[in-house]
């Protein structure tokens, strides 16, 4: 319940709509409760005395009460809809904004499919709780209290039937809610798994078709779909007991009231009109109890969703800008001082261990190493995508934690290992690097990234639509556009995380030549191909999360066994290391 209450603060300007809606419900309920009193008078006075004028008068009053109740109900629906959907929109905005502020380590805690479910399905559950549950939540208790009070006013003895029947219904409804509460958590997790399977299947649909794995994906979907179906059936088989329990109690109460009321009429201690009006209160009171039970069911499910949403909103942001953070990065020098890092504080071993490096401003550095040697982890500490667990990372001579986060990341351009383009045109994607760039600047960046030649062949050039995730272009073309986008930032430190793996060696050589002209920019190149780093000022060899060796190509080729092994495996056909060195230096 605490999570649900905390989310109510996002009502904001819609809080007024909720208050007005609640007042309208009270007024509507009051009009409805007056009708049975008028009906009793109509029968006991008008019908008994054959007074047509009195019957018409009471009938007109009943019609007016009914119309006023209808009008207030319609007005409530308007205000409730505004409050529910406005509240839902603000919660989604808050979640989206929170996720945008997450560090990579925060994102590691949530699956993408789960975040999608929390922003869609879970918010919809909360909206339904307000839209469908707020009316009975207010109306039910008001009608219950006022109805019981009026029924005791009409006939205290018959009203004792409620004292017997109401607890029975309450016990049954408590049992139902108690059984259902934990099942809603399981249900939402089943929705997460379904969304994850659908997302993976649709994202990788081309791979599925290429490997003829459609049948496998179909079976995987059927499995999670059936799991969701079974979970839903298991959950709602208890929820449907709500109506039979209500009907059993209602009709038992009606039979008892008819029995005792009939005997009172025969004994002339009760009038027919009073019994008729009393039965109306019976239906209204029992209906209010039914409303309250439905609210509990809605609330039970919404509490599960509220908890999941609160997990997103209450997630502690691990990385944030310091107060009065430094906004000027003097140069692109980078240093690591006894840096160790692990992704999870509970992990037994460090992903990076005791790394000490110095990269002067304007230098070009290559990083080599086997798969899992923590090359990407190393460079992700520079723009503070993660924070070092132990030690200090410096850029421009300052600890990166002293910088304003936006200023630091603007000064450090990183082309990630996984190339990401967004739906839209080439121009729209490139403008991520510099929103104010004109066409000439865009084309200049494309030329530097060797993207100009394929863009010129496209009919619309920069205005070519890339489709969802850049599906209309090849992997190498994606990489070149991502490089151009990063160059547009005019960073002081430029990091390429294996970002030329999909281009041919000739194009890669052209890109390196273009980058060589950026003399004031520190360039860090992670690569699998030794040709990508052979001409750099310094090469760092990573092994098992540690810096195994540093030096130039010639130095490492002479003394480092890992570098020699990489070189030998990629440069076959050479007579010896020395001749290869000479040839490459001459080149």
Image (cartoon, helix red, strand yellow):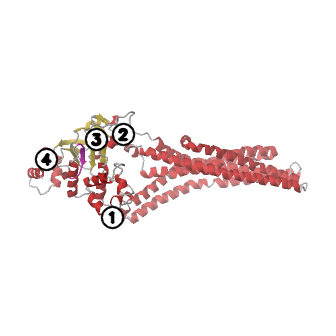
Q: What number is the disc on residue 352?
A: 3
Q: Earlier in the sequence, mark 1 or mark 4?
A: 1
Residue picked out by circle 2: 405
Residue 487 visible (yes or no): yes
Residue 172 visible (yes or no): no
Residue 494, image x, y percentages = 27, 45
Could you give the CA–CA distance between mark 2 and mark 3, rounded to whole angstroms? Answer: 22 Å
Span colored in magenta: 520-529
Which image quarter holds the N terminus?
top right
Residue 526 within the segment the image draws in magenta: yes
Q: Nearer the viewer, residue 438 or 366?
A: 438
Q: Earlier in the sequence, mark 3 or mark 4?
A: 3
Q: What number is the disc on residue 557?
A: 4
Q: Earlier in the sequence, mark 2 or mark 1?
A: 2
Residue picked out by circle 1: 459
Residue 176, image x, y percentages = 61, 50
Dot 2 lies on which element?
Answer: helix
Q: Nearer the viewer, residue 56 or 319?
A: 56
């Amino acid at each position: 319940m605490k999570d649900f209450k905390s989310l109510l603060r996002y009502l904001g300007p819609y809080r007024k709509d909720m208050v007005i809606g609640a007042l309208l419900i009270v007024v509507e309920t009051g009009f409805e409760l007056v009708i049975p009193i008028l009906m009793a008078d109509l029968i006991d006075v008008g019908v008994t005395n054959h007074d047509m004028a009195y019957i018409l008068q009471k009938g007109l009053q009943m019609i007016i009460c009914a119309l006023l109740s209808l009008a207030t109900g319609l007005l409530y629906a308007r205000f409730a809809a505004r409050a529910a959907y406005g509240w839902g929109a603000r919660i989604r905005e808050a979640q989206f904004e929170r996720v945008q502020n997450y560090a990579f380590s925060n994102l590691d805690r949530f699956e993408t499919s789960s975040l999608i479910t929390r922003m869609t399905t879970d918010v919809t559950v909360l909206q339904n709780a307000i839209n469908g549950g707020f009316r009975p939540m207010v109306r039910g208790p008001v009608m219950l209290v006022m109805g019981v009070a009026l029924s005791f006013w009409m006939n205290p003895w018959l009203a004792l039937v409620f004292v017997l029947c109401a607890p029975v219904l309450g016990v049954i409804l408590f049992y139902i809610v108690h059984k259902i509460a934990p099942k809603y958590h399981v249900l939402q997790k089943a929705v997460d798994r379904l969304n994850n399977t659908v997302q993976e299947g649709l994202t990788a649909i081309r791979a599925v078709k290429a490997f003829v794995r459609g049948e496998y994906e179909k079976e995987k979907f059927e499995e999670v779909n059936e799991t969701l179906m079974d979970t839903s059936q298991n959950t709602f088989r208890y929820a449907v007991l709500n109506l039979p329990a209500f009907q059993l109690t209602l009709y038992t109460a009606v039979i008892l009231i008819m029995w005792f009321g009939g005997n009172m009429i025969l004994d002339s201690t009760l009038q027919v009109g009073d019994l008729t009006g009393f039965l109306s209160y019976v239906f209204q009171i029992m209906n209010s109890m039914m409303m309250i039970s439905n609210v509990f069911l809605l609330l039970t499910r919404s509490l599960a969703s509220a908890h999941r949403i609160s997990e997103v909103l209450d997630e502690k942001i691990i990385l944030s800008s310091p107060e009065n953070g430094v906004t000027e990065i003097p140069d692109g020098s980078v240093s690591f001082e006894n840096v160790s890092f692990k992704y999870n504080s509970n992990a037994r071993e460090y992903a990076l261990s005791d790394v000490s490096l110095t990269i002067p401003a304007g230098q070009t550095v290559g990083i080599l190493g086997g798969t899992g040697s923590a090359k990407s982890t190393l460079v992700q500490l520079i723009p503070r995508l993660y924070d070092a667990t132990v030690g200090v990372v410096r850029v421009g001579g300052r600890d990166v934690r002293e910088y304003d986060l936006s200023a630091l990341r603007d000064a450090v351009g990183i082309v990630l290992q996984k190339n990401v383009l967004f739906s839209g045109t080439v121009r729209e994607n490139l403008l991520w690097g510099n929103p104010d760039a004109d066409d000439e600047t865009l084309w200049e960046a494309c030329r530097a990234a060797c993207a100009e030649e394929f863009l010129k062949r496209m009919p619309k050039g920069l205005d070519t639509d890339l489709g969802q995730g850049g599906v209309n272009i090849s992997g190498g073309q994606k990489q070149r556009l991502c490089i151009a986008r990063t160059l547009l930032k005019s960073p002081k430190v430029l990091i390429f995380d294996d970002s030329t793996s999909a281009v041919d060696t000739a194009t890669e050589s052209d890109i390196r030549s273009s980058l060589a002209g950026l003399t004031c920019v520190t360039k860090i190149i992670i690569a699998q191909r030794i040709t990508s780093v052979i001409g750099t000022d310094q090469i760092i060899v990573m092994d098992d999360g540690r810096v195994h060796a540093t030096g130039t190509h010639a130095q490492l080729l002479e003394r480092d066994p890992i570098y020699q092994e990489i070189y030998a495996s990629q440069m076959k056909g050479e007579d010896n290391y020395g001749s290869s060195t000479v040839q490459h230096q001459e080149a």
